Amino acid sequence: MNEEQLRVAACNWLKKHYPLREYYLEPIVFHGIGLTITEYLHKKFKGDQLIRIPYYNELQIRPDIIGVLKFNRNGDFGLGWLIGECKVGKVNTSDFRQAVYYANTSKAYESYLFYNGILSKEVEDLIKTGGHLYHGINKWGKTVKKRLIIVKHDGNRFIKSLL
């Protein structure tokens, strides 16, 4: 499986794995669009639709998968980023740090690293020492510590890592 195929499979998995979620922007494969998230949002949304999206004007990043979750809260709703990064083969430290960087920059509600190879020893050590933690938001819009969700594609299924 090449990286493009992994991106499509991971995006589909996110949609199927969480079928009851409500999306403001359904997960899409963002890689290859040729825009930063901010540029994309300014083309797709206008006015109140745009300014409701968290950090809409600060996201000069290009992750592989993006989506915006919608949360009901006390008669109103809040929004949170869903970010995914995909890697084929051995995941090295720079691959891993890129995924954490995207999560921190977007203050993601959920952020994923999808891979189909192996994690390097250095990456495993980073995970064991908290290197997968980032500052994201909860459904109330408060900044909290979150964990990068690490998911391996193995055969025809995705398996969340328990490191």
Image (cartoon, grey):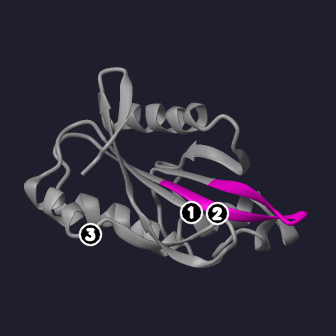
Q: Name the residue under label 1.
A: 109
Q: Residue at x 78, y 61 (%)?
A: 45
Tell me if 140 is positioned left or right of 157 in this view.
right
**Quarter of the image containing the N terminus?**
top left
Point out the tag, 1 or 2, that comes first from the N-terminus: 2
> Rounded to the nearest whole Å, what is the CA distance between mark 2 and mark 3?
22 Å
- Disc ID at residue 80: 2
Amino acid identity at mark 1? Tyr
**Taken as a whole, is the magenta stretch helix, strand or loop?**
strand
Quarter-wise, where is residue 90 in the image? top left
> Rounded to the nearest whole Å, what is the CA distance between mark 3 and mark 1?
17 Å
- Disc ID at residue 131: 3
Tell me if 141 is positioned left or right of 76 in this view.
left
Residue 159 placement (x, y as % from top left): 35, 35
Q: Nearer the viewer, residue 56 or 139?
A: 139
What crowding class fits label 2: few (fewer than 14 Cα within 10 Å), some (14-19), or many (20 or more)? many
Tell me if 66 is positioned left or right of 77 in this view.
left
Report the magenta residues as a range.
68-83
